[in-house]
Image: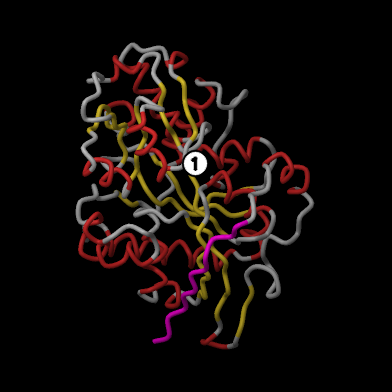
């Protein structure tokens, strides 16, 4: 069987500003649907395939897409998928609306923010659910011992308007800490450990595989990110545009099925992750052997997603209520 897989290097240009994309987004027609620009059918009869450009953030969690490509699960569904790494949802969503991708991986808070601002987005599949693979870490010799000690501290997150800040705020409030007392510092995940060791920040949000590296470096967990009131919180999924869904409904369903099959293969299969993750990240196999295993789910849990939107309003990441059914389609 022929397996369709293209993994392209990341673009070096700066991402489009969300405000600029918003001004253009509602008039763009390059978000897929034609064989020249986006998804398109090639071949005929039983051999027909649909080309699709997919943006993914190179993490352990997006092994779901890479595995689906390498194991021929996309090809089994008649999809020819081109995978391109992104810097996360804040970059991927503007690029998605601008027509650079047909589908992109991103965290739900970024998707809700963009949709509330008028971008025509749809969630097409879930991906990862928060668990032991996300934590707040402090230096090994830090005096901070628990969430109550984080009041007034500087915490590194990869994006200020992100699922991380929502989860941390929820846990701080649960511990009786005023979330507004915390200063969030925006840093890329790979830069956080060095910032912690320099004393530039007091705690860092690490997701696998960066969490395993930080722990190996002598740092320690001060707060599990997805426990108690945040346990099982959906973190990120796969996003497309309204236009792409309308013009390619069968391709979207095929993408969902392939991802679901891939997640079933990967769940609890550390050996496969050790083999796979170093091929699309700079993380060596010995680190992958130590990561906390992700929990994958292709399901879009509308109620849990609505809980996130409600927390975003509570913590003033958005300024009015957001109905997630407008982006999940039901």
Q: Is the magenta stretch mostly helix, strand or loop?
A: loop
Of residue 288 and residue 253, the one placed in the foreground of this image is 288
Left or right: where does residue 271 sit relative to residue 25? Answer: left
Judge whether 323 appears above or below 330 on screen: above
182, above or below 227, in the image: above
Farthest front residue in view = 198
Image check: 265 left or right of 168? left
Quadrant the N terminus occupies: bottom left
Residue in the picture at 41% in, 67% down? 258
> Looking at the image, how many numbered discs can be counted on the residues?
1
Q: Which residue is drawn at 44% across and 28% down?
A: 166
Q: Quadrant of residue 146?
A: top left
Q: Where residue 33 appears, x then y in whole percent?
A: 68, 67
Residue 106 coordinates in the image, percent (x, y): 50, 48
Mark 1, other Cα within 10 Å: few <14 / some 14–19 / many ≥20:
many
Q: Give the range drawn in magenta.
A: 1-12
The residue tagged 1 is 108
In the displayed structure image, the side of residue 314 where residue 223 appears, left or right: left
Quadrant of the image containing the C terminus? top right
Residue 326, percent from left and from top: 60, 41
Q: In this view, does 125 lie above or below 149?
A: below
Residue 284 colored magenta? no
Residue 318 placement (x, y as % from top left)? 59, 27
Which quadrant of the figure has residue 130? top left
Q: Residue at x 32, y 26 (%)?
A: 229
Under circle 1, the secondary element is: helix
């Amino acid at each position: 069987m022929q397996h369709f897989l293209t993994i392209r290097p990341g673009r070096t240009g700066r991402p489009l500003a969300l405000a600029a994309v918003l001004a253009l987004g509602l008039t763009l027609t390059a978000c897929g649907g034609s064989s020249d620009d986006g998804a398109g059918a090639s071949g005929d009869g039983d051999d027909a395939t649909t080309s699709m450009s997919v943006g993914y953030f190179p993490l352990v969690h997006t092994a779901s897409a890479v595995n689906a490509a390498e194991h021929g699960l996309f090809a089994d569904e008649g999809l020819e998928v081109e995978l391109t790494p992104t810097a996360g949802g804040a970059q991927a969503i503007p690029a998605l609306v601008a027509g650079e991708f047909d589908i992109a991986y991103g965290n739900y808070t970024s998707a809700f923010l963009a949709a509330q601002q008028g971008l025509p987005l749809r969630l097409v599949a879930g991906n990862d659910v928060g668990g032991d693979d996300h934590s707040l870490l402090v230096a090994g010799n830090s005096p901070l011992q628990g969430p109550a000690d984080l009041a007034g501290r500087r915490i590194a997150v990869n994006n200020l308007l992100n699922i991380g800040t929502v989860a941390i705020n929820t846990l701080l409030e649960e511990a009786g800490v005023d979330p507004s007392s915390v200063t969030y510092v925006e840093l890329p995940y790979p830069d956080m450990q060095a910032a912690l060791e320099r004393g530039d920040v007091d705690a860092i949000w690490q997701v696998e595989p960066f969490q395993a590296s930080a722990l190996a470096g002598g740092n320690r967990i001060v707060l599990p990110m997805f426990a108690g009131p945040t346990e099982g919180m959906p973190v990120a999924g796969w996003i497309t545009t309204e236009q792409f869904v309308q013009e390619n409904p069968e391709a979207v369903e095929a993408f969902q099925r392939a991802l679901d099959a891939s997640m079933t293969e990967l769940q609890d299969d550390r050996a496969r992750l050790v083999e796979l993750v170093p091929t699309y990240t700079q993380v060596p196999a010995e680190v992958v052997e130590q990561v906390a295993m992700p929990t994958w789910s292709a399901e879009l849990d509308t109620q849990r997603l609505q809980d996130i939107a409600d927390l975003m309003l509570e913590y003033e990441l958005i300024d009015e209520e957001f109905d997630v059914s407008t982006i999940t389609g039901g």
